[in-house]
């Protein structure tokens, strides 16, 4: 529900199915009416839908694999379990979940009903508007660190913090973390620990070693560095990108305010032991907001 929810909808003639096989006006759980498809990922389609009980818009993530293979179902139940454990204003909310019979195959397609965040994702925002002002970036950092702190407190590691997994709500000015389908139990050992998106992977993800919440803090550091500079820290070919982050931290511009430089340097330390916790990051970003009268007035 992260990348696709924020993407621009593609118009589909009313009532005609898209490539998922589903079509507008299909009713889920007697309550959620599909409106239009708004995105797709490796294992799911996302639809904008209307909650007929409240008339509010929601996002419905249907695990009906775009590549044609039968959905396993465990992806949906895992993501639902994680989201149910983390009700938080800076994490996209789970409203309902269930399964629906696929119109073509008859197979049970699991689905999640998720909070609809009306704005763009951070990747789209940076592409459209470039670098953020320090005040906006500090608010972004505070919100995402707050959400991460809740994820970590619930015993999970997100593993894929990146701009397209951060949704921006222009109405409230807040940010929300999305796509908890990649999250793993912090006590779960090394299984699939190397998962992630290369530009934002931590050194320990590259090495394939067991992860802690500090890997999310590292990824958030790279995301915020990109937000405030407008460019990716390790924008290199794949092999070079993997190698360089295991031997040095990202280049942090000297022109950034001192508080920003010290915080981003700590968040992107090579050793996970040297990074602040998500909660310490939240406190630090709140302090950055308080450092400037102009920021306090924003």
Image (spheres, helix red, strand yellow):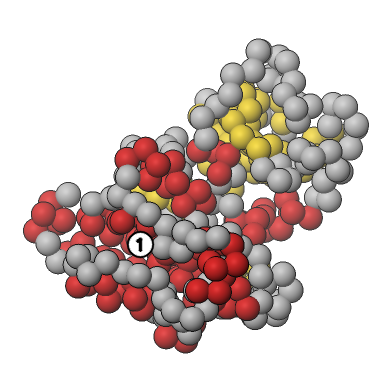
Residue 103: x and y, percent? 84, 26
Compared to residue 190, the image places residue 144 above or below, namely above
Task: From the viewer's perspective, tell me whether residue 289 is left or right of residue 199.
Answer: left
Compared to residue 106, the image places residue 80 above or below, namely below
Quarter occupied by residue 99: top right
Quarter occupied by residue 9: top right
Task: From the viewer's perspective, tell me whether residue 200 is left or right of residue 45.
Answer: left
- Residue at 19% across / 72% down in the picture? 258
**Nearest the camera: 189 or 226?**
226
Q: Kindly identify which residue carries mark 1.
A: 225
- Residue at 66% across / 70% down in the picture? 194
Residue 250: x and y, percent? 40, 71
- Residue at 41% across / 63% down in the picture? 233
Residue 116: x and y, percent? 51, 38
Would you say residue 136 is visible in this rendering?
A: yes
- Residue at 73% across / 15% down in the picture? 16
User: Which type of secondary structure does the marked residue at label 1 adopt?
Assistant: helix
């Amino acid at each position: 529900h992260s990348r696709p929810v924020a993407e621009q909808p593609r118009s589909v003639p009313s009532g005609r199915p898209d490539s998922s096989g589903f079509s507008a006006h299909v009713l889920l759980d007697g309550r959620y009416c599909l409106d239009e498809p708004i995105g797709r990922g490796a294992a799911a389609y996302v639809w904008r839908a209307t909650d007929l009980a409240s008339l509010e818009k929601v996002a419905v993530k249907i695990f009906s694999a775009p590549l044609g293979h039968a959905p396993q179902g465990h992806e949906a139940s895992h993501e639902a379990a994680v989201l149910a454990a983390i009700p938080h204003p800076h994490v996209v909310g789970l409203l309902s979940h269930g399964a629906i019979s696929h119109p073509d195959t008859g197979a049970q397609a699991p689905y999640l009903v998720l909070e609809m965040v009306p704005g763009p994702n951070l990747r789209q925002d940076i592409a459209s508007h470039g670098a953020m002002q320090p005040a906006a970036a500090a608010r972004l950092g505070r919100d995402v660190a707050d959400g991460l702190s809740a994820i970590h407190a619930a015993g999970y590691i997100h593993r894929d913090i990146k701009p397209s997994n951060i949704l921006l709500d222009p109405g409230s000015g807040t940010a929300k973390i999305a796509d908890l389908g990649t999250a793993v139990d912090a006590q779960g050992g090394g299984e699939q620990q190397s998962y992630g998106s290369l530009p934002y992977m931590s050194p320990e993800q590259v090495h394939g070693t067991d992860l802690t919440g500090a890997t999310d803090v590292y990824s958030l550091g790279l995301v915020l560095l990109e937000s405030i500079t407008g460019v990716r820290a390790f924008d290199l070919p794949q092999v070079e990108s993997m190698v360089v982050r295991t031997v040095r931290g990202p280049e942090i511009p000297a022109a950034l305010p001192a508080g920003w430089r010290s915080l981003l340097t700590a968040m992107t330390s090579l050793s996970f032991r040297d990074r602040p916790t998500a909660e310490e990051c939240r406190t630090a970003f709140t302090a950055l907001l308080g450092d400037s009268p102009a920021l306090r007035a924003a």
